[in-house]
Amino acid sequence: MRTLAIGDIHGGLKGLIQLLNKLEVKDEDHLIFMGDYVDGWSESAQVIQFLIDLSKKTDCIFVKGNHDVWCENWLRSQDVNPTWYIHGGKETMESYDGFSSEEKAEHLEFFENLKMYHIDDKNRLFLHAGFTSMHGAEREVYKETLYFDRTLWEMTLALDKSISKDSPMYPKRLKHYHEIYIGHTPTTNFNIDVPMNAVNIWNVDTGAAFLGKITGMDIDTKAFLQSDPVYSLYPDEKGRNK
């Protein structure tokens, strides 16, 4: 049995299916999806339906991303967040054309049941973005931080590698977990199209919403596979490359 961390998808159903085929996912595998299932490419609603169906036959954990929160709020109230609209929300709304009210209700339930974070039996933390509490994600005061924060990743990238874990200067946030897995901040922002590692954090968002790929990583071996660049699978679309 493998535990696979799946990075941000952003409506790229074709890339997701390609990745899962490359991974040769078995029923006994454990899949942890890192959030941001929607907003970007034209098949956001189709991604959600695919994930709902996948979860019926494969062991899946779904973490909540910031784009998922926006879509959830829209499905619940039909209110359109203007920031969401210009960052992929328009395409997500259009992807729901033809979906029945019953199907939309099922998708809303999916979003409502997404986990803010997951900690496995080896003390590995999975969450979309980050946390600011020195006491760990479980004691984060503002829950929105868990799917919006970038300071955890930025701090880790900037950390002086000469600082010992025993030093009082070492960030307390990093001491709580054996490893931390995140999405949210595309590695392509750093001109890197594969997962990045800094200290005990692994970033598996490899820029699928833009010019990058969807990544699946075996968290025990750190081996990973990727889809083709998702934009190449939607040649007539711009995604979030606007």
Image (cartoon, rainbow, N blue to C red):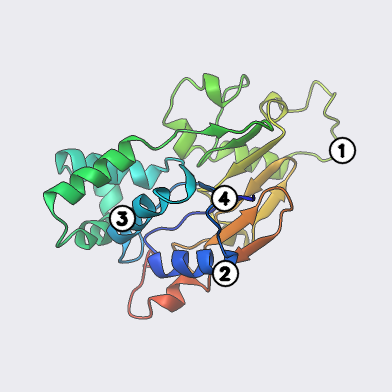
Q: Which residue is mark 3?
A: 49
**First along the sequence among labels 4 and 2:** 2
Rate crowding at label 3 as few (under 14), some (14 to 19) or many (20 or more) other CA atoms within 10 Å.
some
Q: CA distance from mark 3 to mark 4?
A: 21 Å
At x 53% / y 74%, what residue is drawn?
228
Task: Give me the disc on residue 22.
Answer: 2
- Confirm whether residue 213 shows in the render: no
Q: Which residue is mark 1?
A: 162
Residue annotated with mark 4: 28
Query: Can you give x and y, in whole percent of width and height, for residue 178 in the image?
Result: 72, 33
Q: CA distance from mark 4 to mark 2?
A: 16 Å
Residue sitting at 45 percent across and 67 percent down?
A: 17
Mark in the foreground, 2 or 1: 2
Look at the numbered disc 4 and give the secondary structure of its residue: loop
Q: Earlier in the sequence, mark 3 or mark 2?
A: 2
Across and down, in percent, residue 87 comes to 33, 55
Please tell me which of labels 3 and 1 falls first in the chain: 3
Mark 1 and mark 4 lie on one chain; the one further toward the N terminus is 4
Residue drawn at (44%, 73%), measured in percent from left and top? 231
Residue density around tag 4, few if under 14, some if 14–19, many if 20 or more, within 10 Å: few
Q: Nearer the viewer, mark 3 or mark 4?
A: 4
Between label 3 and label 1, give the one nearer the viewer: 3
> Disc 2 on helix, strand or loop?
helix
Q: Is residue 65 visible?
A: yes
- Position above or below: 51 against 117: below
